[in-house]
Amino acid sequence: MKVLIIGSGGREHAIAWKVAKSPKVTKIYCAPGNAGIEEIATCVPIGAMEFEKLAEFAAANEIDLTVVGPDDPLVGGAVDVFEARGLRVFGPRKNAAILEGSKAFSKDLMKKYNIPTAEYATFSDPKEALTYLETAKIPIVLKADGLALGKGVLICNTLEEAKAGVKTLMEDKEFGSAGDSIVIEEFMTGREVSVLSFVDGNTIRIMTSAQDHKRAKDNDEGLNTGGMGAFSPSPFYTDEVDAFCQKYVYQATVDAMKSEGRTFQGIIFFGLMLTREDGKIVPKVLEYNARFGDPETQVVLPRMKNDIIEVFEACIDQKLDQIELEFEDNAAVVVVLASDGYPVSYQKGFEITGQENFSGKEDYFLFHAGSKFDEAGRVVTNGGRVLGVTAKGATLKEARKKAYEATAWVDFENKYMRSDIGAAIL
Ligand code: AMP
Ligand code: GLY
């Protein structure tokens, strides 16, 4: 079968790599893809938001299955455009992707269906938001309602900061219309865990856990980024936490979406905070995403044993109850190699060397994010996050050691990475 993957990041490279392992697959296309994906797929220069062109391409090339990677096309309704043309596509429709597309929607859903999450209030009028803050408990969290590249969340440690945050989001519109409404939320403390899942509208199957590192600098300092590294599994995702979430979070979310007439088929990514109450661990939902996480996918999929095409198809055909997910009993760590200056400003166009050092090494993976071929045919840097270096090991400690060793195998000018990915677990 022929598969089209939409997107161009490390997540899409990891998905393409996993799709390529399926014996059912004869040909992979990726739009727009990157220089690493090009090795296993044919990249087509159509942007992820050009839905009509993408659907036209899928129809003309008799694509059997399209997988939508990023949040923007999902929230924008790419899946609906494909379905309207009778094309097979994996991912939530627009009316379900709102689970990620609107924080106000997701908070209201959790409240209505008693899914544990932080206390909150929603505002579309900045004056009302400011009045609310006067009597609110500090620290407090402000969130732009809409998509903001993972950067629309402000943790405010003083009332002044919070007031300035309202201005940034709602008046200066730093994140555009994403800040038309905001959610003001109780500040929570605890360990964070990411759990990805496949969902067919009725049944949910949980993948292995992971944790990413969002800040740009070591010791969780610096600005929020898309993610500078990740590890899987998370030792904090215990059987107790799993049992709690199975009971109160996972199925409850799928059922809630169905009850709302927004049947969700695709990936739900649960961002969980493991809070403590009276010495007991109480997981709460920080956020939902309607897609694979990046870089989490780069440590989760290399550990997955299933044929991912079978799982995608089961989600589309609502037969996920017939599938059990299986993961290797090991660990994986990904270290993101970024362009120095990310996420603010950075240079592009530097040659990437040493990729060949990864070939034939089973436990090591080089996933490309921001890379492309230049006119001379060289592979060059083309983004803030450039590469993801993943390694698997028997333990997290071993995987971490191997991943950091392998970061030296590739090079480019202005290469920057955090040195403490996974350090907290050791
Ligand atoms: P989100 O995009 O909602 O996951 O938020 C980004 C990051 O902000 C999370 O990964 C947390 O580290 C932090 N965060 C979000 N909401 C809260 C909260 N209510 N309390 C504490 N930290 C939060
Ligand atoms: N790594 C976080 C995300 O994909 O949203």
Image (cartoon, rainbow, N blue to C red):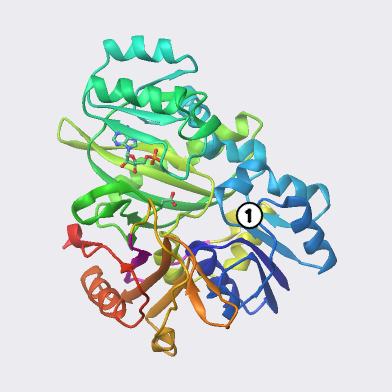
178 w.r.t. 151: above or below: above
- Give the magenta-colored segment's residue range: 324-340
Residue 91 coordinates in the image, percent (x, y): 63, 51
Residue 171 coordinates in the image, percent (x, y): 45, 22
Secondary structure type for disc 1: helix
Which residue is located at x 43 percent, y 76 percent? Answer: 366
Q: Amino acid at mark 1?
A: Cys
98 w.r.t. 321: above or below: above
Q: Specify the quadrant that holds the N terminus.
A: bottom right
231 w.r.t. 224: above or below: below
Residue 54 coordinates in the image, percent (x, y): 74, 58
Residue 140 coordinates in the image, percent (x, y): 28, 26
Which residue is located at x 43 percent, y 83 percent? Answer: 355
In the image shown, does 123 or 287 lie closer to the viewer? 123
Q: Specify the quadrant that holds the C terminus.
A: bottom left
Residue 278 as seen in the image, left or right of residue 168: left
For residue 155, what is the image quadrant? Answer: top left
In the image shown, does 71 or 288 lie closer to the viewer? 71
76 w.r.t. 126: above or below: below
Residue 349 as seen in the image, left or right of residue 278: right
- Near mark 1 (Cα within 10 A), the count class, few <14, some 14-19 or many ≥20, is many
Reply yes or no: does residue 337 show up in magenta: yes
In this rendering, does residue 184 appear at all? no
Residue to which mark 1 is pinned:
315
Which residue is located at x 82 percent, y 68 percent? Answer: 62
